[in-house]
Amino acid sequence: MVAAKQNRSDLFPYLLLSPALLITILVIFYPILRTFTYSFMQYILWKPGEIRFIGLGNYQKALQDPVFWISFKNTLIWIVGVISLQLSLGFGTALLLNQNFFWRGIARSLVLIPWVTPSVITALMWRWMYDGNRGIINDLLVRLGILSSYFPWLASDKTALYAIILALMWQGFPFFAIMILAGLQAIPDTLYEAAEVDGASTWQKFTRITLPMLVPVLFTSLMLRIIWVANSLDIIYIMTGGGPGYATHTLPVYSYIRAYKGMDFGYASTIAVVLTLLVTLFVAMYLRRVLRMEDRGGV
Amino acid sequence: MSKRKGKRRGRRRILTLHLPLLLIVCFALAPYLWTFITSLTPEEDLYLSEFRYFPANPTGTNYVRLFSRIDYGRNILDSLIVASCTMLLGLCITVPASYSFSRFRFKGRTALLAQFLVINMFPVVLLLVPLFILMRILGLMDTHLSLIIAYSTFTIPFSTWMLTGFFNAIPRELDEAAQIDGCNRFTTLLRVVLPVALPGISATGIYVFITAWNEFIYAAILTGSNVRTIPIALQNMIGEFKIAWGLLTAGGVVSAVPVIVLFFFIQRQLIHGMTAGAVKG
């Protein structure tokens, strides 16, 4: 084994790692540190004379800021809505794709297309389909008699967030489908054969074998997806810009708008830090699992 | 099994398998189909009082206008420059790093590996402000380089993990054999391991290319008039009061098709790399 021969103080592995580490420190760790310090500062780009340290000022401001709480609530609705829809449709798709039939290969490839679709394109396509004047969704609903007239899905504060949730379900369900399909294929056939000998029904086989065997995959993909969805920003921003009003403000959107439109870097950093702390919980759970697997030589 | 029983089973499978899956496939493709049809419709026809599912006289004018009127060719060039440089820079840096993670056990290895995983999960908004200020200080605003640097914040951690997985899959006996044959440690990596890892490396590289090609948030804040990648050009078309949907959908099709084609080349490798970690253990 190469590893066994190797001397613990050997510098060669560090040498190979150094460019990656150096860049990471410069463009990731140092900026993150800066964001933390900015979050304790009043820092508005066009008021350079008033940049100063204000302690927890921005955090206190957030607690009393109604828009912050709207964004917080929307973030939770967003995560729960998107994840549950993506997971259910993805699970169903995986169960269908796990069977043997002649067009399975092509079906699997086609189902993946939404997942590779750029966020900007996803946002544009759905915005066009939801359009209040010429949207095909309105046309179909009116034709089916579900709606009496066209409805501006993205311009109404009652429906905008849910309309975007549906668009993100479209883009993300293939991820769950592929992960769960891989999990299904890893379950040994002998388990099902044994259950059949014992006279188990299809439902029993599903709840007693399939579900328990899928727990690791479900856990990993749920964590990854929750983190990704909580952080996602571009689709919402392009579809509604956070509006109408604050109806589609989530924490990343609010932070981005404060930084980009308001040039209020201090407060934007505070919101980003709060979001990061929320996400960290899921990151920690995910990390524990992955590192345990890596130790066993997996990954 | 009797023939009749098999037939009944086949009929049942239409309801429990073929039909639902066909619906899901249609759901996955419908937005593209509608976008493509719209892109073939002359702009005036989009506002006829009667709703048409297919234009009376489909045309390519939207595509022609895309390149003649709004200089989409330059946007494509900007995107190509940024995405290829991000890919090359990323691979040059992460191939040695991942090889090191895969082949050596050294002090701090787990912690270092973990940090590459963690930084990939931080929200973009956490890095946006300081990177913006950094680019201003360095005088890099509105250049290709600013985006290449910004994109390495997510491509380096991602590629390091993917590539470590691919290297792990290559047996170590290969390295040992190379060293017995007189390779030193650099030539082992360059001449023996790299060629074997090439499929995984190209899949990772292409995936990095795709993400850079698609990126919107950094591009919106770090570039503007001089450098304008495709996502920004498309977003700018929305900005105006009335949206030219014919032009916009044509731009969307031109931008998405290469991505989908590239993805089909690397599909197997990528899915393997993605799912391997989740399934085991």
Image: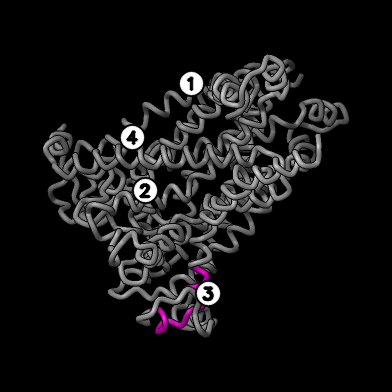
Protein chain holding label 2: A
Q: Earlier in the sequence, mark 4 or mark 1?
A: 4
Q: Residue at x 24, y 56 (%)?
A: A243
Q: Picture coordinates of residue A185 (x, y %)?
A: 67, 31
Three-letter amino acid code at the position of disc 2: Ile
Residue at the disc numbered 1: A288
Cα separation, mark 3 vs mark 4, equals: 38 Å
- Secondary structure of the residue carrying tag 2 is helix
Task: Reply above or below: B278 against B191.
Answer: above
Q: What residue is shown with label 2?
A: A165
| Residue at disc 1, secondary structure | helix
Q: Secondary structure at mark 4?
A: helix
- Both marks 3 and 4 on one chain: no
Looking at the picture, which amino acid does disc 3 mark? Gly
Identified at 53% across, 24% down, the residue is: A215
Contact? badges 4 and 1 (CB < 8 Å): no
Labels 1 and 2: the sequence-earlier one: 2
Q: CA distance from mark 2 to mark 3?
A: 33 Å
Which label sits on residue B73? 3
Disc number lying in front (1 or 2): 2
Residue B175 is drawn in which quadrant?
top right
The alpha-carbon separation of the residues under discs 4 and 2 comes to 21 Å
